[in-house]
Amino acid sequence: MTRTTRGYIARRRRKKLFALNFRGAHIKNARAAIQQKKRALFSAHRDRDRQKINFRRLWIIRINAAIRESGVCYSYSRLIHDLYKRQLLFNRKILAQISISNRNCLNLISNGIIKNSIVGNP
């Protein structure tokens, strides 16, 4: 028997795969491209959450390093606790930017909190 030519439906389904940035069989083979695309979407979703966690970790490290560098026996956890206790609304991103760009400002904030805690003013 002679071979029949297939219709255009399967070809159209495979052509609409958007796998241009992949390498090897993942750009040519439809099944491999589908699997790679699913994996890429899964990794992108997972890594968006990981990125938030990593940036928060980086900000905490920067704040802690700047606080400890000032010479005062003061740690990151005590600073954050005292900020919350005094209802000062600084998030960690802003504190990390202050610690990089203007260390004197961060030292003023921490020293003001230390003075208030020694005196006992809320």
Image (spheres, rainbow, N blue to C red):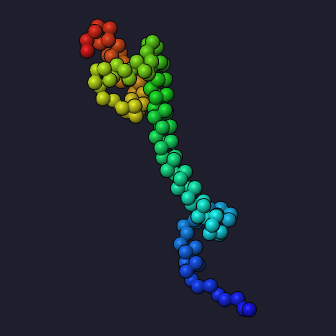
Picture coordinates of residue 62 (x, y %)? 47, 28
**121 versus 104 height, above or below:** above
Q: Which sits in the foreground, 102 or 64?
A: 64
Relative placement, left or right, of 6 versus 76 is: right
Query: Looking at the rendering, in which quadrant would you find the C terminus?
Result: top left
Query: Residue 117 sits in which quadrant?
Result: top left
Q: Which sits in the foreground, 58 or 42?
A: 42
Q: Residue at x 41, y 24 (%)?
A: 103
Which residue appears farthest toward the front when viewing the image? 1
Q: How many marks?
A: 0
Q: Residue at x 52, y 56 (%)?
A: 41
Which residue appears farthest toward the right when viewing the image? 1
Query: Looking at the rendering, in which quadrant would you find the N terminus?
Result: bottom right
Picture coordinates of residue 118 (x, y %)? 32, 8
Q: Which sits in the foreground, 61 or 101?
A: 61
Which residue appears farthest toward the top when viewing the image? 119
Asked if residue 21 can be seen in this view, the reply is no
Q: Residue at x 45, y 34 (%)?
A: 56
Relative placement, left or right, of 64 versus 20 is: left
Q: Residue at x 46, y 29 (%)?
A: 60
Which residue appears farthest toward the bottom when viewing the image? 1
Asked if residue 96 can be seen in this view, the reply is yes
Picture coordinates of residue 36 (x, y %)? 60, 59
**108 versus 9 height, above or below:** above
Relative placement, left or right, of 86 versus 26 is: left
**83 versus 29 height, above or below:** above
**61 versus 29 height, above or below:** above
